[in-house]
Image (tube, rainbow, N blue to C red):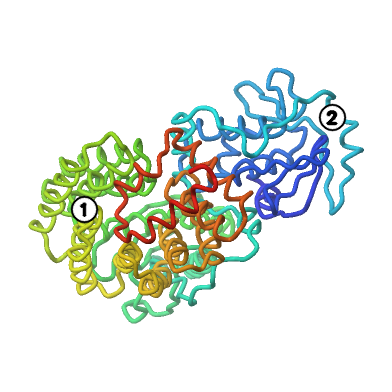
């Protein structure tokens, strides 16, 4: 997307689109005194279309801008456009706002005015008359499970929406600063060797190495360590780029090598041949080419390094990582997909302990995602698989975490805490273990003990995702702090808009904070995700064992029809 599109995502200026006043900071549309609140992704799509008003924005552009860095199905965008049209009262057959351009994308046809106080009246004159009234924010959502399934695709995003963050009165509490390069691959470029005697050739060899070092320094996710020595071992960089330059008549040959300094293994090599016409042009071309390829090679090397701690089969590791991502969605369909991914990993490597642990977790969570599931048999199967993982390799902390997770779902919280103690003993910086411990203490009625644990988890892994903020917000809610509960639960909902548990606790926290209008909106979201939702049935599979907290949850949610 162009830079303007990137600015759209962070822009909070008010604007008018047709008859509607748009407030991105509040995720709200207003017309003739009627306000309609929309989801953050809906607002982002609207802003993207407004940035290119009158022009066609392709589906790929919208997907890249609104769901950056994650592969999301077309259904996610389609459902978002449907919600946007419903909020605007637009008719797709005679659009006054969003027009579908067949096989290309979408176009905003209404006039757009920007500024602090855009003239809605002037815009209204440009809009098509007779647009139907929008649905009220509390109207029943159609589609039931179809809506929830469509949202699964959107969830594999978990991408931060700045506009939604700004819609809350406060931001989540700041975390302790961490080293942004702590886990980044470190690389150095050794001055290239000149294999000839020509002075211009030696100059080129030095220039290629120096420029490559400078260009790599500008890349995100790569930590460049400078060295001038021919032997880069003193630099302590994990990856070392070396090379040579040789002129053969009017042909220039460049050899480039990427080596793992810890294992002395050559990870990649490339031979380039270019006409020796313009030294500077050749130098720029080579530098650009290497900058394009090196980051991906570094990432491949880092991925291979991580995989070898658990399996020698890189394809199995790919399936395992896919399963991890799918499991975090916490929806029945995604959980089934995660289970299939873990099974494929095990087929490729029957001794892959972490894949067994992941498979165990899919069975452990299933009764909470699919109420018709047989909880007894699912949890029994989960325990068998987790024990298999432990027997394969008891020195992997994630295996003990999986056991703790299974025990938690079985409401055997004492055994869960024992397993997590083992996980932490193996890895004192294991953020997920602290987070699950925090959740358990909330389940058993001691949320105050869990808050510092989840704060520790967030410091160790600020990218822990929606679950960390859910655990923190839930702990504050159960500890009686509705304000901090709302702050963190909204952060969780922004990162995972289709997580039922987050919506349930956010609705309860908003009631506790005396914001019944917002609480009712969250309750409607619960019914949209699960039309047959029953709090009584949900609590039967929920691992919370503290009766007082369950009673409080019932009392608060009753006020918004849950």
Number of the label disc, if any, that sits on residue 173: none
Q: Position of residue 304 (x, y in %)?
A: 27, 56
> Residue most toward the bottom?
234
In the displayed structure image, the side of residue 413 where residue 381 appears, left or right: left
Quadrant in which residue 237 is drawn: bottom left
Asked whether residue 203 is in view, the answer is: no
Residue shown at 41%/66% (left/top)?
196
Graded by Cα atoms within 10 Å as few (under 14), some (14 to 19) or many (20 or more), the crowding at tag 1 reads: many
Question: What's the distance in space between the residues labelled 2 and 1, CA to CA?
Answer: 58 Å
Residue 427 sits above or below residue 234 on the image: above
Q: Position of residue 470 (x, y in %)?
A: 44, 58
Residue shown at 49%/49% (left/top)?
557
Q: Secondary structure at mark 1?
A: loop
> In the picture, which quadrant includes the N terminus?
top right
Q: Earlier in the sequence, mark 2 or mark 1?
A: 2
> Residue most toward the top?
93
Asked whether residue 139 is in view, the answer is: yes
Residue shown at 38%/64% (left/top)?
243
Q: Position of residue 77 (x, y in %)?
A: 55, 34
Q: Position of residue 455 (x, y in %)?
A: 42, 72
Viewer-nearest residue: 105 or 149: 149
Residue shown at 29%/42% (left/top)?
338
Q: Secondary structure at mark 2?
A: loop
Graded by Cα atoms within 10 Å as few (under 14), some (14 to 19) or many (20 or more), the crowding at tag 2 reads: some
According to the picture, the residue beneath numbered tag 1 turns out to be 410
According to the picture, the residue beneath numbered tag 2 turns out to be 127
Quadrant in which residue 311 is drawn: bottom left
């Amino acid at each position: 997307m162009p830079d303007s599109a990137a600015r759209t995502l962070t822009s909070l200026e008010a604007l008018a689109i047709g008859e509607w006043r748009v407030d991105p900071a509040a995720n709200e549309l207003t017309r003739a005194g009627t306000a309609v609140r929309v989801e953050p992704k809906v607002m982002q799509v609207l802003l993207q279309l407004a940035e290119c008003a009158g022009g066609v924005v392709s589906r790929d552009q919208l997907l890249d801008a609104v769901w950056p860095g994650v592969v999301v199905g077309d259904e996610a965008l389609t459902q978002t456009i449907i919600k946007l049209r419903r909020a605007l009262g637009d008719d797709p057959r005679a659009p006054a706002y969003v027009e579908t351009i067949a096989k290309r994308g979408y176009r905003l046809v209404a006039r757009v005015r920007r500024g602090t106080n855009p003239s809605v009246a002037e815009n209204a004159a440009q809009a098509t008359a007779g647009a139907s009234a929008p649905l009220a924010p509390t109207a029943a959502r159609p589609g039931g499970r179809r809506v929830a399934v469509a949202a699964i695709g959107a969830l594999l995003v978990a991408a931060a929406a700045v506009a939604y963050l700004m819609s809350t009165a406060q931001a989540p509490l700041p975390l302790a600063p961490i080293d942004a390069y702590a886990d980044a691959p470190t690389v150095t470029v050794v001055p290239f060797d000149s294999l000839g005697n020509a002075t211009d050739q030696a100059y080129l060899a030095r220039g290629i190495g120096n420029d490559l070092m400078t260009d790599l320094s500008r890349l995100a996710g790569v930590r460049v360590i400078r060295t001038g020595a021919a032997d880069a071992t003193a630099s302590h960089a994990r990856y070392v780029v070396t090379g040579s330059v040789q002129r053969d008549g009017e042909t220039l040959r460049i050899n480039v090598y990427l080596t793992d300094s810890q294992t002395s293994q050559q990870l990649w090599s490339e031979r380039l041949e270019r006409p020796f016409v313009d030294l500077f042009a050749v130098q720029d071309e080579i530098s650009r080419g290497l900058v394009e390829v090196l980051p991906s090679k570094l990432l491949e090397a880092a991925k291979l390094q991580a995989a070898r701690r658990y399996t020698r089969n890189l394809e199995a590791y790919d399936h395992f990582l896919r399963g991890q991502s799918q499991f975090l969605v916490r929806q029945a369909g995604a959980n089934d997909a995660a289970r299939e991914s873990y099974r494929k990993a095990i087929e490729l490597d029957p001794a892959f302990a972490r894949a067994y642990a992941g498979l165990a977790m899919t069975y452990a969570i299933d009764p909470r995602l699919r109420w018709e599931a047989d909880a007894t048999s699912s949890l029994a199967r989960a325990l068998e698989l987790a024990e298999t993982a432990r027997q394969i390799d008891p020195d992997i902390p994630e295996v003990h975490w999986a056991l703790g997770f299974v025990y938690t779902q079985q409401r055997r919280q004492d055994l869960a805490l024992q397993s997590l103690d083992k996980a932490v003993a193996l890895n004192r910086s294991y953020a997920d273990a602290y987070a699950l411990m925090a959740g358990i203490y909330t389940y058993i009625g001691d949320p105050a003990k869990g808050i510092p644990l989840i704060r520790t988890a967030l410091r160790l892994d600020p990218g822990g995702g929606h679950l960390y903020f859910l655990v923190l917000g839930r702990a504050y809610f159960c500890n009686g702090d509705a304000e901090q509960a709302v702050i963190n639960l909204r952060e969780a909902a922004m990162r995972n808009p289709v997580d039922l548990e987050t919506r349930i606790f956010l609705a309860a926290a908003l009631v506790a904070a005396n914001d019944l209008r917002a609480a009712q909106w969250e309750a409607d979201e619960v019914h949209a995700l699960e039309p047959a939702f029953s709090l009584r049935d949900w609590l039967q599979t929920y691992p919370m064992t503290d009766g007082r907290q369950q009673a409080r949850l019932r009392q608060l949610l009753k006020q918004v029809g849950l």
